[in-house]
Amino acid sequence: MRIERFEDVDSWKQARLLVADIYKLLGECKDYGFKDQIQRAAVSVMSNIAEGFDRGSNRELIQYLIVSRGSLSEVKSLAYAGLDIGYFSHASFEEVIMRCNRISNTLNGFIRFLKTSERKG
């Protein structure tokens, strides 16, 4: 399958699901600082994939995918905090971490692919 739009990128699709998960899990959370931070980090994962895709070169896309991976690490770190302070159940925490790990693996594979690809835009 040819990837012609950012919506075709598997890691973007997975990041979109992560955003939905985070918003659902914290729907009732009254700690607006924590809630805002983890939601923004999750949205940043998918947004950087989209923005990088339309930058026009593999080099720029790779840079944005690396930034996206950093935001993903922020989500994971905040998930640990959320578990420790009782905002996430152990099951919810595990689900978030597993999704983050899947996205990270997909991003890493995409980066490896792009380093050898002829894609220009």
Image (cartoon, helix red, strand yellow):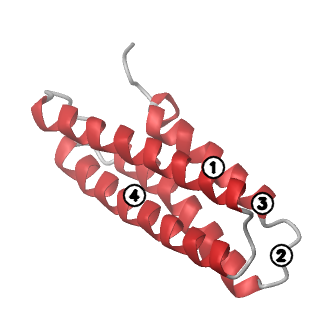
- Nearer to us in this view, 38 or 95: 95
* Residue drawn at the location 15% of the way across and 28% of the way down: 117
Disc 2 secondary structure class: loop
Residue kind at label 1, given as amino acid type: Glu
In the rendered image, is residue 70 in sight? yes
Cα separation, mark 2 vs mark 1, equals: 18 Å
Q: Earlier in the sequence, mark 4 or mark 2?
A: 2
Q: Which residue is mark 4?
A: 68
Report, in whole angstroms, how far the alpha carbon at label 3 lies from the one at label 1: 11 Å
Q: Which residue bears the numbered disc 2?
A: 29
The residue that disc 1 covers is 95
* Distance between the alpha carbons at the discs numbered 4 and 1: 19 Å
Instruction: Give the label, 4 or 1, closer to the camera.
Output: 1
Q: Residue 6: x and y, percent?
A: 46, 36
Q: Nearer the viewer, mark 4 or mark 3?
A: 3
Q: Position of residue 26 (x, y in %)?
A: 78, 67
User: Pointer 3: what residue?
Assistant: 25
